[in-house]
Image: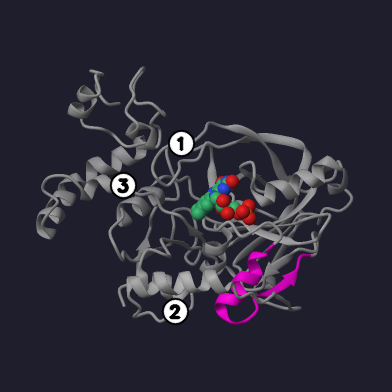
Amino acid sequence: MGELKIVENADWNIEIGALSVLSSKHIENTPALLFDRIKDYPAGYRILVGFFESLRRSALTTNLPVDITREGFIEACRRRLATNFSIPPVTVSRGPILENVYQGDDIDLFKFPVPFWHKRDGGRYIGTGHVIITRDPDDGWVNVGCYRVMVYDCNTLGMNISPGKHGRMHRAKYFEKGKPCPVVACFGVDPLLHMIATRPEPYGKCEFDAVGGIKGEPVEVIEGEITGLPIPAYAEIAVDAEILPDQGKEEGPFSEWTGYYASGEKTEPVIKSPPSLSSQRSNHHRLAGVSPHRAGRALLRIAARRIHSGPGGKSRRAGRERRRKLLPSLLNRHLDQAALPRSCAPGCICRQSMLGRRLSRPLHRRRGRRHRCL
Ligand SMILES: Cc1cc2nc3c(=O)[nH]c(=O)nc-3n(C[C@H](O)[C@H](O)[C@H](O)COP(=O)(O)O)c2cc1C
């Protein structure tokens, strides 16, 4: 069907990030990439990127006919937003997520091929196309959001949650009481769950219910042994743990998908087993995952639109030819692009540079600033 390309022998260090950008670049209906036999990892420890990058895959994900037109898709989404069906999740006692359960010293997050996506990132990021599950300690409602997750070491994670996000509100409520915040970080989930987690559902509304409404059946969840939080039974990796109120570590930066850094590194609370309990209860931080041959991961991609625009890109053939010539330089540019500062040169007023895009020199001159675009 042309919806998937398998890429073997790529390096988790920068190469997967670069190939993910180069393969998509805002072309319509590009195949998803499934990386297998990743450098330093056995076959079967796979990474999936670009799972929404075609209308057919988006339709499949959202329970719509795969031959739907773009207009039909938009119309169906509008109708759904207006009707807002919801079906709460159902708790089951078993599921593929329980096939392999690691506890205490057996937990090693680097068992999975966590990529180093961009040259100036602060570390290796496992959480890009994933979900984060938390519960309101007062009202009990469960939120499913998506906030990036960095791996510090084999059993410590860092997470960036912006102010105003529901997961952050939950965390603040626990921290105000001096308590750790129970959290589940889930990787390799149903793409629909990730899609809905990145949408601002109203405060108090659980994303599992919205997913159930779209699928027409409840999401099956198991109960996390540490946190009691609902964990999708068919997720590929889940970390059942706590965010600690009294331990912070430098997190970030991480390049935005548009190709720039929105912020530098910041101190964020770490996700780990509580130090006071870890020696007595070494299983306090638990990692559950499906069998390695199915271990996979989903992520967002970074766009490099420029390769398709501008003179010479008009006909498909000319565009193809231009891309072929540009590819090597674009690879290098991608690696550097994420490091662009918010302003391209001191005093420059060009707004595009704040979006991380390079400008041609004539445009800079028109704006009255004569300098080379960085
Ligand atoms: C791929 C992806 C990554 C994201 N990463 C972050 C992040 O690191 N931090 C953050 O605060 N929001 C991030 N967001 C945005 C949130 O997921 C989005 O605002 C969502 O509505 C948050 O859920 P909440 O409203 O339940 O808190 C990301 C969105 C996407 C699509």
Answer with mark 2 or mark 1, whichever residue precedes in sequence. 2
Q: Which mark is residue 304?
A: 3
Identified by mark 3, the residue type is: Ala
Q: Where is residue 270 in the image (x, y as percent from the top left)?
A: 70, 42
In this rendered view, identify the residue nearer to me: 165 or 260: 165
Horizontally, residue 152 falls left or right of residue 337, namely right
Question: What secondary structure is marked by label 3?
Answer: loop
In this rendered view, identify the residue nearer to me: 233 or 137: 137
Q: Name the residue under label 1.
A: 261
- Magenta span: 205-224
Residue 194 in sight here = yes
Q: Is 221 colored magenta in this rendering?
A: yes
Residue at x-position 40% and y-position 32%: 339
Horizontally, residue 203 falls left or right of residue 316, namely right
Identified by mark 1, the residue type is: Tyr
Q: How crowded is mark 2: few (under 14 residues within 10 Å), some or many (20 or more)?
A: some
In this rendered view, identify the residue nearer to me: 166 or 10: 166
Answer with mark 3 or mark 1, whichever residue precedes in sequence. 1
Answer with mark 2 or mark 3, whichever residue precedes in sequence. 2
Q: Position of residue 113 (x, y in %)?
A: 52, 55
Q: In which quarter of the image is residue 72?
A: bottom left
Residue 126 in sight here = no
Q: Is 107 colored magenta in this rendering?
A: no
Horizontally, residue 325 falls left or right of residue 73, namely left
Q: Which of marks 2 and 1 is in front?
A: 2
Q: Position of residue 342 (x, y in %)?
A: 41, 29
Horizontally, residue 247 falls left or right of residue 198, namely right
Identified by mark 2, the residue type is: Leu
Question: What secondary structure is marked by label 2?
Answer: loop
Q: How far apart are marks 2 and 1 (CA)?
A: 35 Å
Q: Name the residue under label 2.
A: 64
